[in-house]
Structures are given as structure tokens and as C-alpha cells.
Image: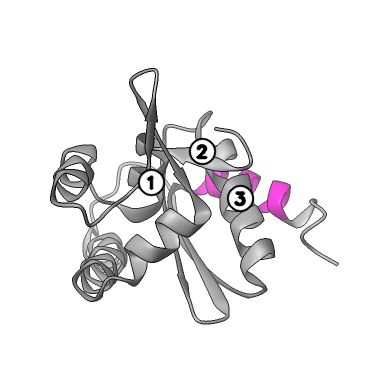
Amino acid sequence: MNNDTYDLNEVALMSGLTTRTLRNYLNQGFLKGDKADGTWRFTVEDIERFFAEPFVKESLRIKRTAAVFDFLADRKKDTEQTCVILDIPSSLQKGNAIADFFCRMMKDVSDIDFRYDRDGGCGRIILYGAAESVATLMKAYYGTEFKD
């Protein structure tokens, strides 16, 4: 990923939608981006427009709610787990920089799931998984320039 665009896997990571679902939305024209050298790239504006589609917005809401509900409902965890919901009032630019930070960090983490959504002036980050990994990621976030 670079700071200006996201690839299909990163949009899937943020949204909780599968790459197959996203490809269907591309074919239907609901998700727009540019394809170069066989790789789809999406600007922040492409993603914002897509996330703002009423049926997509509802689908994302359902995915977020299901992720948190499933975390709470699973009482038979083998390891210590945690779920963090972080609402971040911010400008669009700062919110996208924060989403970019979490996308980059998630590339090296396999035991955490991540969702990102922005509605109005607030970004929402949902992280859930291995407690130690979530704590490490949150510590990295709070050590960044995002926190004044």
C-alpha cells in the first residue's frame, strides 16, 4: 500500500467484505478504482463513495455488529482475547491517515481482525483477537503522531 491508494485486500481488511464480494461490486459498477498491472487501486475518495452507498453502509454496519457480537458470544476461547472499539473524531485526512496506519500494521499481524469505518466526522476502528497483539498495536497507535 502507498499513502494515496489502497489495494483490494486492504479494502477487504477495512470493510470485512471478501475480495470476491468486492470484485462483484466492481463488476456491477458500485465500487470504482483503477486497475494497473493487474492490480486494483482505490483512492480514499473511491472508498468513501463506496462506503457511502446505502446498501454497502448497511452491510458494513452488519459486519461490524456481527464481529463484536461473535466476539462476545464466543465464551470458549483457547487464549486471552480482547476487543477494542476506538471512535476517533477527526478530519477526513487524519481519519484516513489513521486507517492507513492500522492497515500497514495489520500486514504483520495474523491473530487480530480489524475493521474501519467512517461516518460523519468520526472514524471507528474495531480490533479483536489475541489480547497481547491488540495491546501491542494500541500501544503503537498511541505512540504515533496521531495522538496529540
Q: Residue 95, position in %: x, y?
A: 62, 64
Q: Which residue is mark 3?
A: 135
Label 3: element kind: helix
Q: Which residue is mark 1?
A: 11
* Magenta segment: 131-141
- Mark 2 surroundings: few (<14), some (14-19) or many (≥20) residues within 10 A: some
Q: Nearer the viewer, residue 80 or 148?
A: 148
Q: Residue 137, position in %: x, y?
A: 62, 46
Residue type (three-letter) at the residue carrying disc 3? Ala
Which comes before the other along the chain, label 1 or label 2? 1
- Mark 1 surroundings: few (<14), some (14-19) or many (≥20) residues within 10 A: many
- Confirm whether residue 127 shows in the render: no
Q: Which residue is mark 2?
A: 106
Res 123 label: none
**Spatial CA span between label 3 and label 1:** 23 Å
> Quick check: 2 left or right of 47?
right
> Quick check: 85 left or right of 55?
right
Residue type (three-letter) at the residue carrying disc 1? Val
> Quick check: 148 left or right of 85?
right
Task: Specify the quadrant of the image occupied by residue 48.
Answer: bottom left
Label 1: element kind: helix
- Confirm whether residue 44 shows in the render: yes
